[in-house]
Image: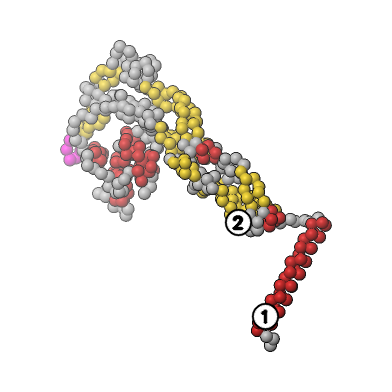
Amino acid sequence: MADYYDLLGVSRNADGDTLKRAYRRLARQYHPDVNKDPGAEDRFKEIGRAYEVLNNPETRARYDQFGEAGLGGAAGMPDMGDMGGFADLFETFFSGFGGGSPGRPQRRGPQQGDDLRYDLTIDFNQAVFGQEREIKIPHLEVCDVCRGSGAKVGSGPISCSTCGGAGQVRRATRTPFGSFTQVAECPNCDGSGQVIADPCVSCAGKGVNQVRKKLLINIPAGVDSGTKLRVGGEGNAGFRGGPPGDLYVFLRVKNHPKLHRDGLTILSEVSVSYLQAILGDIIEVDTVDGPTKLEIPVGTQPNSILTLENKGIPKLGNPVARGNQRITVNVQLPNRLSDQEKNLLEQLASHYSARGRQHHHHKSGLFTRLFGQN
């Protein structure tokens, strides 16, 4: 299933009116009664599902945070239990093709504010251990002068003269099939039925002001790139007394020069000399907790993997549980040898060669004693 916002062709902060306009346009385009192309019906169902989810603030918030997995329901045609989606579709066709249904005036009540997105880049170690981080976000807040009413102090909204307070205007349209009445939202009051005669000077009658606010964000231990943090009530302010939206902080974690993450495991590499690999040693390696001692066992083979327990990534939501760090050992062979090193290695090679011949001779003698000579 494609992203719901992409299906409707709207941005992630689109308001309800933008969603409805996009839905109506696409519903007309892909409705099976209008569009006979293969796949049009499936596309129509997907568009309906997307609109039903995004038009509801509760399901939209779950979708923004968890994707389709947060909805809990199967994809397909939208749930029209409240007839909301069907009513929008009915209005789409009958108003779009010249019909109309007077219905009841749809006054606009309180509207929830838009959710906001903030992209935050953090260091590798900040993602591992968590941190409190101060950010500055521009968002809409309720005007503190008019307290969101949009009217100058001491005054208030009055009934819209264009629609008479109904929030809707009607227009008669003549067609070859007869005269139809088309109902539309009042353009003067945006469907609210009221206008501000004496607007607040501070917010120019909008009831909200754009401000830049400082927020202290708590980044939990174990986050990764793509993690979304929800900060409730810190999105844009609502209109006409509606609740504010939420702020979603999208995290991007910088790469570490030496450490790499694989789930809860940290991967790294270390280089040792061939003598350290043969004889064993104790060296220092980089970890997220700082330099830590690592034992190189005697006879360590090239590309061996050694483990440092509890030096990995804390589990998100349960920082007591940590992964491990796995270290790949690279054994470096010398390109050049000093005369002394060469002589010592030649003596060692001769020693092993002599032991090999002696061992072979011993095995041959033992074979002869056991099985006789052919």
- Distance between the alpha carbons at the discs numbered 1 and 2: 38 Å
Asked whether 179 or 29 is in front, the reply is 29
Which amino acid lies under the numbered mark 2 shown in the image of this protein? Answer: Ser
Image position of 83 (left or right of 365):
left
Q: Which residue is mark 2?
A: 304
> Furthest residue to the top?
154
305 versus 211 height, above or below: below
Please report the residue visible at 68 percent of the width from the left and 57 percent of the height from the top: 278
What is the magenta range? 175-180
Image position of 125 (left or right of 61):
right
Asked whether 250 or 268 is in front, the reply is 268
Q: Secondary structure at mark 2?
A: strand
87 versus 112 height, above or below: below
Among the two numbered marks 1 and 2 on one chain, the one whose residue lies closer to the N terminus: 2
Image quadrant of residue 97? Answer: top left
Please report the residue visible at 38 percent of the width from the left and 43 percent of the height from the top: 67
- Say if the magenta span includes residue 176: yes
> Furthest residue to the front?
369
- Say if the magenta span includes residue 15: no
Location of residue 62 in the rendering, given as x and y in whole percent from the top left corner: 35, 39
Q: Secondary structure at mark 1?
A: helix
Please report the residue visible at 31 percent of the width from the left and 19 percent of the height from the top: 149
Asked whether 365 or 211 is in front, the reply is 365
Mark 2 Cα-neighbour bin, 10 Å: few <14, some 14–19, many ≥20: few
Location of residue 60 in the rendering, given as x and y in whole percent from the top left corner: 34, 38
223 versus 138 height, above or below: below
Location of residue 350 in the rendering, given as x and y in whole percent from the top left corner: 77, 66
Image position of 48 (left or right of 129):
left
Image quadrant of residue 286? Answer: top right
Q: Which residue is mark 1?
A: 367
Which amino acid lies under the numbered mark 1 shown in the image of this protein? Answer: Phe
